Amino acid sequence: MIPASPVYARDTIRQTARAIGTPCLIYLLASLVLLIPPTVYLILREYRWRRRERSLRALLDNADALEAQLHQCRERMQALRAMLVDLPEEMSADADEALAADDKVQAALRDLLQHRLWIQKHGADAPLDQLDNALGALGQSRAALGRQLGQLAEITHQLREARAR
């Protein structure tokens, strides 16, 4: 057996550990208390920045999708006009009413261009709630246009059936 050295006696080690550990623990806790608020601030700032970026990206993506829907609507209207030439006037009354919306499509494309210019000019510094409101408005426009495209598809289907008879 190895005799216990008076230099490394257990009581001495514990006393040294206590003497060194207490100030280190205090410094560690003080460091954590000082570092937590800036860390939380940076995390929240990053979250807000990413949310803004997602809103802008969604806004631009919805604007692209709305533009594609408007062009699709215009193409369907032109196809309907070509079909109306062959049909009697009483059969094409519903289609004539639907085709009267061509000016509305052109106006919607102009409005969409205005929205894109607003996004380009103010998108970087606009409040997040304004971006969310614009995103909601584009979503409503897309939904309404989707319903109109459905109506145009139904009218096209009815006209094709009438032509086949």
Image (cartoon, rainbow, N blue to C red):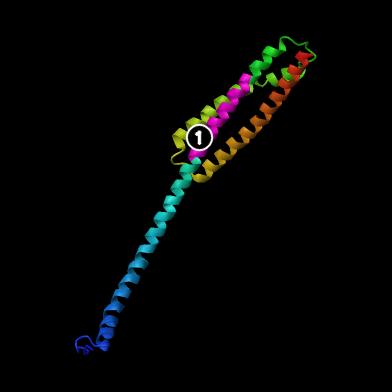
x%, y% of residue 77? 65, 19
Quarter where residue 156 is shown = top right
Residue topped by disc 1: 60
x%, y% of residue 128? 50, 45
Q: What residue appears at the point 59 percent right and 27 percent down from the top-left corner?
A: 69
Amino acid at dot 1: Leu
x%, y% of residue 34? 35, 65
Quarter where residue 3 is shown = bottom left
Q: Report helix, strand or loop for mark 1.
A: helix
In the displayed orientation, state which residue is furthest to the front. Answer: 1
| As drawn, 90 above or below 132 | above
Q: Main secondary structure of the magenta part?
A: helix
| As drawn, 18 above or below 30 | below
Q: Specify start and end residues of the magenta stretch as a single range.
A: 56-75
Count neighbours of disc 1 (C-alpha within 10 A) and say few if under 14, some if 14 to 19, many if 20 or more.
some
Q: Quadrant of the N terminus?
A: bottom left
| As drawn, 78 above or below 24 | above
Q: Identify which residue, 8 or 158, lies in the foreground.
A: 8
